[in-house]
Image (cartoon, helix red, strand yellow):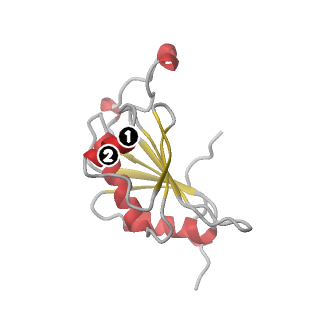
């Protein structure tokens, strides 16, 4: 069972609240942020039926997950981004054709019809760059009518949990 988000943040041109939440998650060392386009409930597609297990992706409204990974032992910290979508196979190559490709130095670890696209973010990539890429990809893979804004669901620490300094 997934715990409910600590905060829900809607954003358009100003993602500063989401970037602050990402910084808090990263500093505290636990949690993640989901991002998806805001879709009016009337425009949401119907839930896939039981036979959908034999078909394509059930993710009609795309969902991106940003997960910073603290390094453990000798392992380097690696941030990952996963994107569930319903646009078909080989998303990474289609994004490259659409001029929204996976940035140089990032590594695709999964590109699957049902399990989505997963990339490891290059060390040194900053959160604004990552969030900007997430939003660009979500704009390309959203197949339902959306408001043009996005919703971030922040799982993990509250802002008050961040160390002061």
Pick the quarter of the image with the N terminus.
top right
Q: CA distance from mark 1 to mark 2?
A: 6 Å
- Contact between labelled residues 2 and 1, with CB atoms less than 8 Å apart: yes
Label at residue 95: 2
Residue 8, image x, y percentages: 46, 53
The quadrant where residue 86 appears: top left
Q: Is residue 1 above or below residue 35?
A: above
Along the line of sight, which residue is nearer the eye, 5 or 30? Answer: 30
Residue 2, image x, y percentages: 62, 43
The quadrant where residue 59 appears: top left
Residue 21, image x, y percentages: 49, 65
Residue at 56 percent across and 67 percent down: it is: 26
Could you tell me which secondary element the residue under label 2 belongs to? Answer: helix
Residue denoted by label 1: 91
Label at residue 117: none
**Few, some or many C-alpha atoms within 10 Å of disc 1 (few <14, some 14-19, many ≥20)?**
many
């Amino acid at each position: 069972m997934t715990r409910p988000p600590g905060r829900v943040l809607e954003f358009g041109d100003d993602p500063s609240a989401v970037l602050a939440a990402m910084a808090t998650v990263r500093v505290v060392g636990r949690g993640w942020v989901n991002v998806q386009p805001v879709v009016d409930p009337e425009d949401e597609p119907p839930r896939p039926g039981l036979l959908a297990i034999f078909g394509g992706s059930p993710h009609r409204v795309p969902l991106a997950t940003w997960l910073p990974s603290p390094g453990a032992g000798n392992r380097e910290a690696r941030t990952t981004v996963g994107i569930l979508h319903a646009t078909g196979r080989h998303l990474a190559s289609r994004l490259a054709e659409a001029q929204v490709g996976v940035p140089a130095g990032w590594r695709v670890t999964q590109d699957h019809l049902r399990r989505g696209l997963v990339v490891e973010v290059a060390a040194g990539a900053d959160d604004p760059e990552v969030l900007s890429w997430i939003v660009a990809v979500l704009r390309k893979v959203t197949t339902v009518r959306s408001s043009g804004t996005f919703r971030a669901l922040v799982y993990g620490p509250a802002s008050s949990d961040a160390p002061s300094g």
